[in-house]
Image (cartoon, coloured by chain):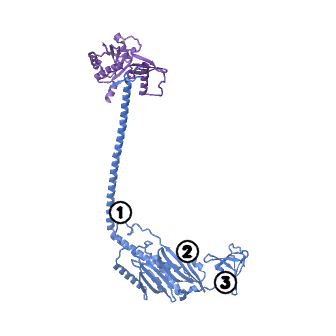
Chain colours: A blue, B purple
Amino acid sequence: MLVWYRPQPNEVNFLPWIEGYLSARRRKRQCLYGSALGMVMLSVGALVWLYFNLLQAQAGVHRHMAQGAQHLQVQQQRWWDASLHQRRLEWGQVQQGQQAFDAWWPVHQLSRVLITLQPYQQLVSWQWQSINTGQQVVFTITGGGRWQDWWQRAVKVWPSLQVEALRPKPDGWTLEARYLIPALPLSLPSKTPLAAPPAHVFAIQLTPQSLSAAGVGTKVEVLGSMMRQVANYGQGIEIVRGQGVQIKMRLDASHWAGLAPLPSAPGWQLQDLSVQQTPSQQWLVSLQWLPNHDTPPSHGFRQAPTAALQATTYGNIEHYAKAFQNLPLLVQAPLMQGALASINPARGKVQLAEDFVFMGYSQQQGQGPVAWFKVLLTGQLLRVEVGHHIDNWRVSAVGSQGVNLTLGQQSVTLKHPCFKQVCQLE
Amino acid sequence: MLKQLTWLRIKPLVLGMDWQVDNLRMVLLGPASKGNHQTAPKLLGQWHWSWPLLSANGPVEAQPPWQDFIAQVAGLRAKAPVHVNVGIPNHLCTWLHCPAGLFEGRAKGVALQLGYQRMAAKALNIEPANLRVCYLQLGPNLSFLVVTKRHYSDHIGQLIMSLHDAVQGSVVGRIEPQGLTQFVAPAGIDDACAMAWFMAHKVRLPAC
């Protein structure tokens, strides 16, 4: 290797050291560039190698996942097929439980209404209906005394109870009420035979054989079974076949308890159950079933009622039946025919004072005085002037202290209610 | 690389040359003896030839005396690198005063060297390509451009390259003006070869 000495600032070298120096720098620079290029090429090559390895790994993972999913699908299908017998057994048990529940549930609701009645109150009519949003119970009772007492007891039992009509009677009142039993969706347990195998795992979709499929012949047998159950109610049963099946019968009060369990059969769903009082000692009972088209009930599956619940239901009904036999009929046939609506006698003094509360008084210049009543039954405000009539009572005078109403020779003054317990004693 | 590292451990030889155009004197010094760094370098040989180096009788490296010299040096070096320092007479060099900061901040590297060369060529009215210029800074505000003709250095460069081709080893070449130094040659050195010895002795070898 021949090099020319590179002189220090205080030295001299005439030989071509500058050319050698530049050549060395050029070689060093080329070496540096070559190294950088080599590193870049190596890096690119490494990245490409890594990318292709990642692609291969990804393809391998996909392949393994596909094989695993296929294996799982096969295993799941085998398990599903193998459990067909067990699922049919469980499905039968679930259906039996649901039938038992359906057979007891409406009668149990009837018993709950009956147990709320006092000895001087009677059931006039009761109807249970299955509607889209759940179940609806409409009933009419009659009684004497204060209806508010019964109402307070009933509201504790059914918070959603609503008054449809409240009509006076010469010896009491008639009240029609309604409450809803919402359809609460019940989550099926994982072991329920209707629960399909998990479909979200690797998007496996299984189409197991329908468990609830039933042929026409089966439906006929089921209907015959239900008719045999209906025959247990006794003679004189009227059966109407249309889209569904409807039966009407008259039951003595002593046979009320025999209503439960109601006839039930797979494929048929009880749509309506009504009980109406008749002028005789018998009750008109009507039941209606509709085919449920193999669809599970919207409120999910229920378990069969316990023996305690059945005993309670029986006890409530028998208790009322015994009390009913010892009581005279308070409601006669005209009540059933809607004659009650025309009975609307004038209220007495005491009842008028209980139903209306004098709330205020106003008078504008050039106009007559105006009084305001609150109707306790509905909570509405009523505006009255002199000359108006309230339940045949004529408003004779309106003042700041109260309102005077007259009916023939009778007269009553409605004053401010005593809210603060410091009112003057009359 | 290992070969280079091995050479670094071998102490180099220094060849001092006194070139007087028609006379060439050379002194070859070797490293001092082991354990005695204070002693002078070992004299390995001294040569003197008298012939017109710049004559047109063919290339110098082809002359028999030069071939004999190369053969002797090749036998003495034993793979050691050779540092060659050639001194040329002062009358072959021109010293030009270079004002301080003339090219400061305007050029560096090759451009700066070209600037020096053009400045010297303008001052001497010679083609820049025919000059060898070296910037010499003797003090903070005292700088010179030492100039010589290119064909002097080219001839000496050919001698050094022929030496490198012959010894097949590491050779470092250097050529500089001899200056006006006068000194006494040590014992064992001919008085005529005193300048060659001085050129060899002034080379600062790396410490081993």
Q: Secondary structure at mark 1?
A: loop
Q: Quadrant of the N terminus of chain B?
A: top left
Label 3 to label 1: alpha-carbon separation = 77 Å
Q: Which residue is mark 3?
A: A393
Residue closer to the observer: B206 or A270:
B206
Q: Residues within 10 Å of mark 3 (few under 14, many from 20)?
A: many
The reply to whether dot 2 and dot 1 touch (C-beta < 8 Å) is no
x, y (%) of residue A377? Answer: 61, 78
Disc marking residue A204: 1
Mark 3 or mark 1: name the one nearer the start of the chain: 1
Residue closer to the observer: A357 or A123:
A357
The kind of residue tagged 1 is Ile
**Tag 3, which chain?**
A
The kind of residue tagged 2 is Lys
- Is A86 placed above or below A272 here? above
Q: Which residue is mark 2?
A: A156
- For the point 43% across and 71% down, the residue is A300
Total marks shown come to 3
Label 2 to label 1: alpha-carbon separation = 49 Å
Label 2 to label 3: alpha-carbon separation = 35 Å
Q: Is residue A203 visible?
A: yes
